[in-house]
Image: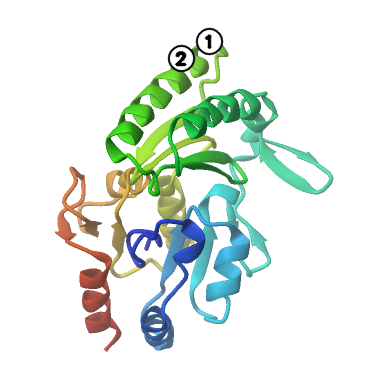
Amino acid sequence: LDYDGTLREFEDSPELAVPTAEIHQLLRALNDREDLMVHIISGRSAMFLRSHFGCYGRLVLIAEHERRVAGRFQVWRPDPSDVVSGAGVSSPKTELQDWRNPCRLEMSRSVVAVEGSHVEEKAASLVWHFRRASDSAKAEAAAKMLVGRLHRLRTARRLRELRVTVGHKIVEVSCRSGTKGDIMRRLCDARKRVNKPFEAVMIVGDDVSDESMFDAARKEFLTIKVGRASTRAKYFVDSPAQLRDFLWQLAS
């Protein structure tokens, strides 16, 4: 499961989109089902996932941007050839390249141009949010311009692993060695290697980054898109509330 826009509705500010009492009740019920193994793969920080969901002992919490399993004393490690180590921390080689400052500068131009927008810094990405923009049409136009500038920057500086994605009222630039689909596939492969393959797999997401999971899914997997946007998923629900209704049926 993805979190924002999938399990939980969006809010004007990400910090407001904390789990509701209903979500906690649902996760508690899913956590109690010993025949289910729930994974939350989110762009949220490991600290956010650990603080809000760490109380559920059977939930696997993956902070996608940080490549680690929150609160499980493990690190989600990229391929060894793609990392360097220092001070006990592993990070992608591309993180060493000077991409963050110029990308931040381009996003700062958009913040100045669009009232109500802001930049969020994550471990391996920068995100320009314009959900609270006072002029939505102006914000959408500014988003297109920002995407163009970031792509030109990527080309000019030869940052081949720099990714520019457009989501729900956001533009994200990231420097990562893998996708949610890579993580999902590795989770399934790890179970097969110990002769405990999942009997069935359900994948749910709402955004562009979740499409990599749908692409990587085997044909027998159940893939669900939240919302009516174009997707590789087989099925869709209209809203996080509708998804939660479906998850309640699984939990019970």
Element class at badge 1: helix
Left or right side of 93 for 214: left
- The image's mark for residue 152 is 2
Element class at badge 2: helix
Residue beneath the point at 26% across and 82% down: 248
Relative to 190, say whether 31 is above or below.
Answer: below
The x, y position of residue 167, in whole percent, is 35, 42
Tell me the crowding category of disc 2: few under 14, some 14 to 19, or many 20 or more residues within 10 angstroms, Cα based. Answer: few
Residue type at mark 2 is Arg
* Closer to us: 142 or 89: 142
The x, y position of residue 85, in whole percent, is 77, 40
Relative to 35, say whether 141 is above or below.
Answer: above
Q: Work out whether residue 145 can be spotted.
A: yes
* Closer to us: 147 or 31: 147
The x, y position of residue 115, in whole percent, is 44, 39
Please identify the quarter of the rendering in which residue 135 is found: top left
* Closer to us: 204 or 23: 23
Relative to 239, say whether 172 is above or below.
Answer: above
The x, y position of residue 14, in whole percent, is 47, 57
Q: Quadrant of the C terminus?
A: bottom left
Residue beneath the point at 50% across and 34% down: 111
Residue type at mark 1 is Ala
Toward the right, the furthest residue is 87
Relative to 234, say whether 47 is above or below.
Answer: below
- The image's mark for residue 156 is 1
Please identify the quarter of the rendering in which residue 236 is found: bottom left
Left or right side of 23 for 244: left
The residues bearing labels 1 and 2 have C-alpha atoms spaced at a distance of: 6 Å
Residue beneath the point at 21% across and 45% down: 232
Contact? badges 1 and 2 (CB < 8 Å): yes
